[in-house]
Amino acid sequence: MDGLTRIQCRSLMKLSSHVPRATAHAISRRHASTLATTNAPSTKERVVILGSGWAGYAAARTLSPSKTTRILISPRSHFAFTPLLASTSVGTLEFRAAIEPVRRLGLDEFHQAWASSIDFKNKTIRVEANLRGDVSAATNRPEIKGEEFDVKYDKLVIAVGCYSQTFGIEGVKEHANFLRDVGDARAIRLQVLQAFETADLPTTSDEERKKLLHFAVVGGGPTGIEFAAELHDLIKDDLSRMYPKLQKHCAITVYDIAPKVLPMFDSKLAAYATETFKRQGIRVKTEHHLTRIRRQGHVLMLQIKEEPEEVGAGIVVWSTGLMQNPLVKTLVESDTEGVGKIAKDPRTGGIVTNPNLQVQLQGAGDGSETTTLKDVYAVGDCTSVQGASYPATAQVAAQQAVYLAKQLNRGEREASKPFKFKNWGVMTYLGSWRAIHQSEADNLRGWAAWVLWRTAYLTRSMSVRNKIMIPVYWVITWIFGRDISRF
């Protein structure tokens, strides 16, 4: 007994001799039981989730930690509350109010990485670590090769979402800004403020100011419309006081190839949105086709089919169309030995699932008859459910993920009912405390719809922390204005 004197050793030996034999046996049994529990293999199933978007995050959040071993693989370590990204891009909210760190879910494992391939036969995922850190939607970032490793699964949930569709238009990847993650919102915020600083220089001509302070939004869906509305509020409420001489040069234009913006809304609400924008000075140009973007000095030059000359802009925000994740494209085009080929939706290119969200394999012949791939599920924008046509929205992805996680919690012994989507309606902010809302129950517009819009986004935010911080930031912005610092 190192560190003890002989007298201390003898005292300890005497004390141990007086310990009752029953007590010693009890201690011995308890110790053996603890060792057996520690060394016993886990009987919980390993459920691996690919992606931390609306579907992936909701699935990980709903899965029972006592019944499953939860493993999440995603190139980003957070979940982005996408409806609030437009607000963060103009300083109405701070970036952290729109994200939820996935490690706060108390997962058994989390890997900040991309899944590059899946071996369905051996239930193994090949993963590449994300060493870049930046996971914004921009596609012109330098690639950094990360370390590769394998992850085993018992059940697999594919929830990788989609990428922004560029339609092969020249210059979009290099010069346009997407709005799908916090990194995108931060880049937009910096460029908008930099455009005003550059335009305010005495060396900048009025012609250059007109181009710099023209903000182009391509895409007339909810994301594009809400960004244009938030940008209008920023310019009108805050930047107009700080750059009063530049207001006559400011312009916001929404371009869309469709006959009307907001096609998911009925014609009356879409017309109300267009009229509201017109009163606010936001131009809406439908049936306009962008064919090229190129850089010229500090500005971007847009070639639009319906315009006789190129149009200058300080920033282009791209919000139109979705394309499948590269992993999904690889999965539906490859044939796994001993398993088969995953069924592909001909319209979206996504993974076909049955109503229980189980991934389907192509059948023989024309492929119309499919079979189920055991233990593999897919949810969210990357999927297409047989016999249904769901929109690629956050509420569809979240509801699918919650449904699937609850089924996995129950286990295979209980028969599951097929997934059924409950439409809570759609809403869009129009600026100046106005919005529109459409549901099966009613249609709202104006200030009442704006109150519902903010209430819905607040209640849908995930953590208690953000449920507190979001209204705090709204109040701070209302009293003191938006933060326009660049950092």
Image (cartoon, rainbow, N blue to C red):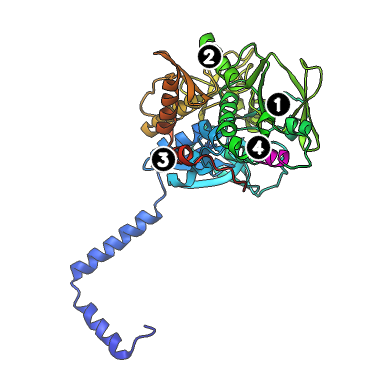
Instruction: Tell me the CA gap for discs 3 and 4.
Output: 30 Å
Instruction: Tell me the CA gap for discs 2 and 3.
Output: 34 Å
- Left or right, 160 with respect to 9, comes to right
Q: Is residue 419 visible?
A: no
Q: Residues within 10 Å of mark 4 (few under 14, many from 20)?
A: many
Numbered disc in front, either 2 or 1: 2
Residue 274 lies, in percent from the top left, at 58, 16
Amino acid type assigned to the residue bearing label 2 in the image = Tyr
Residue positioned 58% across, 22% down in the render: 280
Identify the mark nearer the N-term, 4 or 1.
1
Amino acid type assigned to the residue bearing label 3 in the image = Ser
Identify the mark nearer the N-term, 1 or 3.
1
Above or below 428: residue 464: below
- Name the image quarter holding residue 287: top right
Residue 300 lies, in percent from the top left, at 76, 32
Q: What segment carries the magenta color?
A: 193-200
**Looking at the rendered structure, which numbered label has been put on residue 463?**
3
Q: Which residue is mark 2?
A: 272
Amino acid type assigned to the residue bearing label 4 in the image = Val
Residue 430 lies, in percent from the top left, at 53, 23
Above or below 457: residue 467: below
